[in-house]
Image (cartoon, coloured by chain):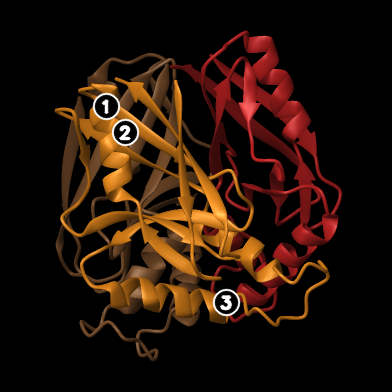
Chain colours: A brown, B orange, C red
Amino acid sequence: MMKVLNIRTSKRCEFVDITPLVRKVVAESKVKSGVCLIHVPHTTAGVIINENADPDVVRDIDSTLRKLAPEDGNYRHMEGNSDAHIKSVLVNPQTFVFIEDGKLVLGTWQGIFFCEFDGPRHRKIYIKILEG
Amino acid sequence: MMKVLNIRTSKRCEFVDITPLVRKVVAESKVKSGVCLIHVPHTTAGVIINENADPDVVRDIDSTLRKLAPEDGNYRHMEGNSDAHIKSVLVNPQTFVFIEDGKLVLGTWQGIFFCEFDGPRHRKIYIKILEG
Amino acid sequence: MMKVLNIRTSKRCEFVDITPLVRKVVAESKVKSGVCLIHVPHTTAGVIINENADPDVVRDIDSTLRKLAPEDGNYRHMEGNSDAHIKSVLVNPQTFVFIEDGKLVLGTWQGIFFCEFDGPRHRKIYIKILEG
């Protein structure tokens, strides 16, 4: 069964730590061993796994992505959010985390972040858990 | 069981919308709920999920990737396609899409694109469906 | 069941071909058909699938990543390894490979590389195999 999470972002570019939300879905599933797959059904957003201890890390990721895909680049798509589409491709709209003993298996410093690149918006996150 | 799709690209760099091909594989599998995993067995190609409504979006993605990994960069690999290897790493040769009610679960604007970075060539796409 | 591999890297940035290690895990699992998922539980490392025939290919990938996320960039995170976090996001800390007839299904030129961006360190690689 697929679970749908709803979140609300508050800025144009924002990294939202969704680790607690994903942990809750895994706990409710009662699955002891498996894989938790995450898919963001948007083309101007993404999901990453990286450090959630020092918030400066995602700030540095954000500022580098702005250099790689500048908001005011010379783009053809007329909606003014080509940079957001490109960032979505670079970070990917998908990730997965293993489940062991009913818990997410993340590294000591790893958290799961929803990446908003064209907010603020209401966004969805799809989660599916495979046992195994 | 793994399904192999064969496609033929027509340019050096090209984004081919393979959503209809993947939908067909999923329909034929009769799987009602699960995950459709896609792997491109090439080192100078990739697969992304992004907007397939306005073709200018993938043109902007393509032109930005050309800036991040220029064809005429100062590379050591002598085959003249280092840019293509780098782009393959940046976009990834893999993706997955959930299946619910026997159908691919993609966002309103999402399509699946095979990314050719060193064509034109005959290319393969591997697909596997896990139930769950 | 999740399998944990331990490796030791020897440089700050290094691409270690882990294909033989992953093949061994798959062989020992006795799984004939499925998916081998790989997760790196670190925020300054990653895993990619790309050419392992000519070592110049990963050198070119490495040198381009250094341009996209320079070590001496203007970062806020004070540990001096923001470039490594950014590279981890760009290449991803995760990948998967299909298994058919008890073997990894990789393209002719594809190998699996652990990407060290902030070594030398002791590192872990988590592997899980789903049948299907």
Q: Residue at x 43, y 17 (%)?
A: C132
Q: Is residue A24 visible?
A: no
In this view of the protein, which residue sits in the foreground, C82 or A97? A97
**Residue C75's quadrant in the figure?**
bottom right
> Where is residue C3, by image quadrant?
top right
* Residue C32 at x, y percent in the picture: 57, 12
Q: Which is nearer the N-term, disc 3 or disc 2?
A: 2
What amino acid is at disc 1?
A: Glu
The image quadrant of residue B84 is bottom right
Same chain shared by disc 2 and disc 1: yes
Of residues A2 and A9, the one nearer the viewer is A2
Chain letter of disc 3 in the image: B
Q: Check disc 2 and give the amino acid type.
A: Val
Q: Which residue is mark 1?
A: B28
B28, above or below C116, in the image: above
Q: Is residue B94 left or right of residue B84?
A: left
* Label 2 – label 1 distance at C-alpha: 5 Å
Quadrant assignment for the N terminus of chain B:
top left
Categorize mark 1 by other alpha carbons within 10 Å: few (<14), some (14-19), many (20+): few
Q: Chain of mark 2?
A: B
Identified by mark 3, the residue type is: Leu
Residue B12 in picture, x, y percent from top left: 56, 71
Look at mark 3 in the image and give the residue it sits on: B68
The residue indicated by pointer 2 is B25
In the image, are marks 3 and 1 on the same chain? yes
- CB-based contact (under 8 Å), mark 2 and mark 1: yes
Mark 3 burial class by Cα count in 10 Å: few <14, some 14-19, many 20+: some
> Do marks 3 and 2 both belong to one polypeptide chain?
yes
Please give the name of the residue rendered at 20% of the width and 60% of the height, measured from the top-left corner: B109
Mark 2 lies on a secondary structure that is: helix
* Direction from residue A82 to residue B62 in the image, left or right: right
Q: Is residue B1 above or below residue B22?
A: above
